[in-house]
Structures are given as structure tokens and as C-alpha cells.
Image (spheres, helix red, strand yellow):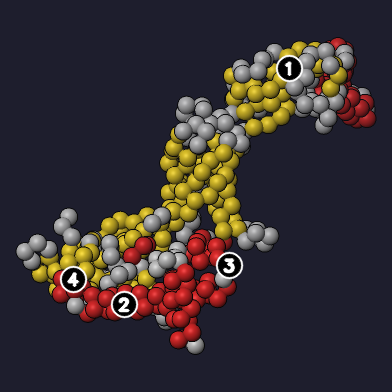
């Protein structure tokens, strides 16, 4: 068969005038046997090249690399303060953000404030028509005064043992009833005046004067106090022991381009069974007055701190067939003419918290160890390496 292929090839070359034909020329002939022959020839050549390359690599691994040493860079491990954060998102709230509604029905006769106006606690904001209630109170006061006079006279007579006890008791009851009725009417009259329950800013005037309002239905004003702002956010239950009252928090407001620091003010004693989380409350200082209710905030909560942490880049960690994590360290450092030399050693490690591109080492490395950074994945155990100059 091999002889037949050689004969066919020779015949094809002769037919082309003795010149080696190109791939395109062979395909253009439409000769299936010649095309298949060329394919076989190329595959054999490819296999021979691959074997030659492997032989060269094998030689270099045994001689050149071991003789000169792989070129790597190292980094000496030092302990440092390490703060780990969990990142969450929440929105700003305030405990003093309410909508004022009427307690009595009637016509809104006056609105004394405007949107954006600052008001003090107890300040009059609006008035509802009392429907003649004030006049009724004045009439009741006249009746009360008569009842008082009658009672006082009956009391003097009774003290002198004149008159009957029943007359004295009736006069007393009548007077006290009149006084009670007046107090009740005055309380109702007081409800026709809407006052500020706390100091703050009028955020919205929802209804104009002249409209009829009803208890539990009509919204008149919204008042907001921007001083006592806070963020409430849900934290996964696995952080319940590390996120507690007093935990440090960094608060970022992306829209404002502002960052503030705070601490956890309160943690919930209840775990939400639907998402296995608990709530925390974080106060926010709003001296500038730029932070508004429902503003989005990004939180970085400091759930872990190690004052003597060993940190290394995540990229230098490898894993063996058993699933153990390890790094390569440079041992037995020696000064050379152009480079320092060392021997690569494998260290199995245990890891802790991760932050961005760094990871905490809990065991396997010590302060002062030189880990191989650049070239870590290309060196082998006990291989000589050359150290790049810093």
C-alpha cells in the first residue's frame, strides 16, 4: 500500500512538471486519492513535529531550567490589621415622618404653613370649622356659673343644717356635670386646630383650605424631621454573632457622593423565617440636611477584625488532587551575581476570610515567609528558582 502511495505521488508530481503542487492545486484536480494522500502526508508530518517538540521540552526541563532556575518574583509575608466587611444595601428612614389627618369632620378653613417651611413642636398648622362649638361652650359656661352659685348656696345651708341632703347633692351633681361637659366640649374644640407633633419641615400640603375633611380619610399635611435618620437592613442569620450592637458601619450614598461612618444602634431579637435574616438599625448623621427618607445607601459592616492577619493574593493559591490548597514558597535564599536563588517548596495552607483579591491565611504560613507570586504555577517542588530584583 505504501509503495502504491509513493508511485501515485511521484506520478502526480511528474504531471505537474516536476514542481511540488500546492494544497489548492491538489484540491482543484478533484482527484480524491491524491487529496487523501496529501492529508495522510500532512498528518504524519504533524505527528513527527509534535514528538520533536516534546523531546526538546523534556530536555529543557531536565537541563536548562534546573541549571539556571525559573525566574520568579517573591513577596515577604507580614502581619497586618485586617478588617472584613459584609456589603448590603438599604434605604434611609426616619421615625418622624408622618401624615397629619383630621380628628373631627368639617371644612378646612385655614392652612397656616407652606411646603418647605420649618415648624416647631406645638405650632399651629391648620384649622377646621368648629360648627359653632365655641359658641355652645360659652353658653354652657353661663349655665355652669349658675349651677356653681346654686351649689355654693346649698352647701352653706347644708353646713348650717338647713335644707335637705338631697337638694345639696342634686346641686353638687348638676354643677359637676356642667363642668365635665365643658371640658369635653373644649377637648373636641381643640381637635379642630391641627398642631405640629414635633419640630420638622412641612414636606407636602395635600389639601387646600375650603375643602371638606373627614377623620381617617383626608390627608392634610406631611411633616418630616430630617435630624433622626436611620437605615434599617436585613442581615443573614449566619452573621448574628458577629454583627451586634456597636459594630462599625461605613455608609455610602452613591447619589450624593457622600460617605459617613456609624455604628449598629439596634439588632432585632427575631429571625424572619421566610428569608432567615434579622434586622439591624443604623443611625445616620444628617448635619447638612442632604439625606432624605428612602434614599438608597450601600453599607459595609465590619463583621470581623484580626490585628495580626497574614494576607496573600488569591491568584497564587493552587489545589492538589486531594483538594488541599497550597502555595509555593522560596526557601534557602542565597545571593548570586545577577539574581538571588532559592528552592521552591510547597506549603499546604488553611484559609479564612476573603476580601477582594486577598485572602487570610489561618495556618501553613508564618510571618517572614517568602511566597512566590509571579511564576508560582510554573514551578515544582524542590526546583531551583531565580528571584527577580525589586
Image-based side of 295 in relation to 358, left or right: right
For marks 2 and 3 on the same chain, the one whose residue lies earlier in the sequence: 3
Rendering coords of residue 333 (x, y %): 13, 70
Circle 3 sits on which residue?
30
Image-based side of 35 in relation to 313, left or right: right
Q: Are marks 1 and 3 in contact (CB under 8 Å)?
A: no
Q: Residue at x 15, y 71 (%)?
A: 68
Q: Nearer the viewer, residue 344 or 42?
A: 42
Q: CA distance from mark 4 to mark 2?
A: 23 Å
**Any mark on residue 283, and which?**
none
Circle 4 sits on which residue?
69
Residue 295's image quarter?
top right
Q: CA distance from mark 2 to mark 3?
A: 34 Å
Residue 364's image quarter?
bottom left
For marks 4 and 1 on the same chain, the one whose residue lies earlier in the sequence: 4
**Any mark on residue 126, and which?**
1
Circle 2 sits on which residue?
52
Q: Residue at x 73, y 14 (%)?
A: 111
Q: Secondary structure at mark 4?
A: loop
Q: Residue at x 69, y 26 (%)?
A: 222
Residue 62's image quarter?
bottom left
Q: Residues within 10 Å of mark 1 (few under 14, many from 20)?
A: many
Q: Nearer the viewer, residue 263 or 2?
A: 2
For marks 2 and 1 on the same chain, the one whose residue lies earlier in the sequence: 2
Image-based side of 126 in relation to 388, left or right: right
Say above or below: 85 vs 385.
above
Q: Secondary structure at mark 3?
A: loop
> Of discs 1 and 3, which sits in the foreground?
3
Q: Secondary structure at mark 1?
A: strand
Amino acid at each position: 500500500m505504501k509503495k502504491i502511495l509513493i508511485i501515485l505521488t511521484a506520478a502526480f508530481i511528474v504531471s505537474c512538471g516536476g514542481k511540488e503542487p500546492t494544497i489548492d492545486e491538489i484540491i482543484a484536480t478533484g482527484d480524491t486519492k491524491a487529496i487523501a494522500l496529501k492529508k495522510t502526508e500532512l498528518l504524519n508530518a504533524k505527528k513527527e513535529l509534535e514528538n520533536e517538540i516534546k523531546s526538546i521540552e523534556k530536555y529543557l526541563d531536565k537541563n536548562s531550567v534546573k541549571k539556571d532556575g525559573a525566574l520568579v518574583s517573591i513577596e515577604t509575608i507580614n502581619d497586618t490589621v485586617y478588617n472584613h466587611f459584609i456589603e448590603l444595601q438599604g434605604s434611609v428612614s426616619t421615625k418622624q415622618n408622618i401624615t397629619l389627618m383630621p380628628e373631627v369632620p368639617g371644612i378646612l378653613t385655614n392652612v397656616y404653613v407652606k411646603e418647605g417651611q420649618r415648624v416647631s413642636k406645638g405650632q399651629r398648622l391648620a384649622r377646621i370649622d368648629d360648627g359653632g362649638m365655641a359658641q355652645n361652650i360659652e353658653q354652657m359656661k353661663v349655665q355652669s356659673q349658675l349651677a356653681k352659685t346654686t351649689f355654693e348656696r346649698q352647701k352653706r345651708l347644708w353646713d348650717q343644717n338647713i335644707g335637705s341632703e338631697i337638694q345639696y347633692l342634686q346641686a353638687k351633681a348638676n354643677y359637676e356635670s356642667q363642668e365635665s361637659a365643658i371640658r369635653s366640649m373644649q377637648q373636641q374644640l381643640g381637635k379642630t386646630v391641627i398642631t405640629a407633633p414635633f419640630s420638622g419641615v412641612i414636606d407636602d400640603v395635600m389639601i387646600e383650605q375650603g375643602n371638606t375633611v373627614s377623620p381617617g380619610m383626608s390627608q392634610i399635611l406631611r411633616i418630616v424631621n430630617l435630624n433622626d435618620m436611620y437605615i434599617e437592613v436585613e442581615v443573614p442569620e449566619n452573621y448574628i454573632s458577629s454583627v451586634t450592637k456597636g459594630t462599625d458601619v461605613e455608609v455610602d450614598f452613591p447619589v450624593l457622593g457622600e460617605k459617613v461612618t456609624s455604628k449598629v444602634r439596634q439588632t432585632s431579637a427575631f429571625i424572619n423565617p421566610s428569608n432567615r435574616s434579622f434586622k439591624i438599625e443604623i443611625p445616620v448623621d444628617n448635619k447638612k440636611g442632604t439625606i432624605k427618607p428612602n434614599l438608597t445607601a450601600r453599607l459595609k459592616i465590619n463583621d470581623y477584625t484580626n490585628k495580626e492577619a497574614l494576607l496573600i493574593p488569591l491568584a497564587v493559591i493552587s489545589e492538589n488532587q486531594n483538594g488541599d490548597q497550597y502555595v509555593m514558597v522560596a526557601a534557602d535564599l542565597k545571593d548570586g551575581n545577577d539574581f538571588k536563588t532559592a528552592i521552591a517548596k510547597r506549603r499546604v495552607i488553611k484559609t479564612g476570610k476573603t476580601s477582594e483579591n486577598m485572602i487570610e491565611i489561618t495556618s501553613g504560613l508564618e510571618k517572614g515567609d517568602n511566597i512566590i507570586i509571579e511564576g508560582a504555577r510554573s514551578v515544582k517542588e524542590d526546583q531551583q528558582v531565580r528571584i527577580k530584583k525589586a
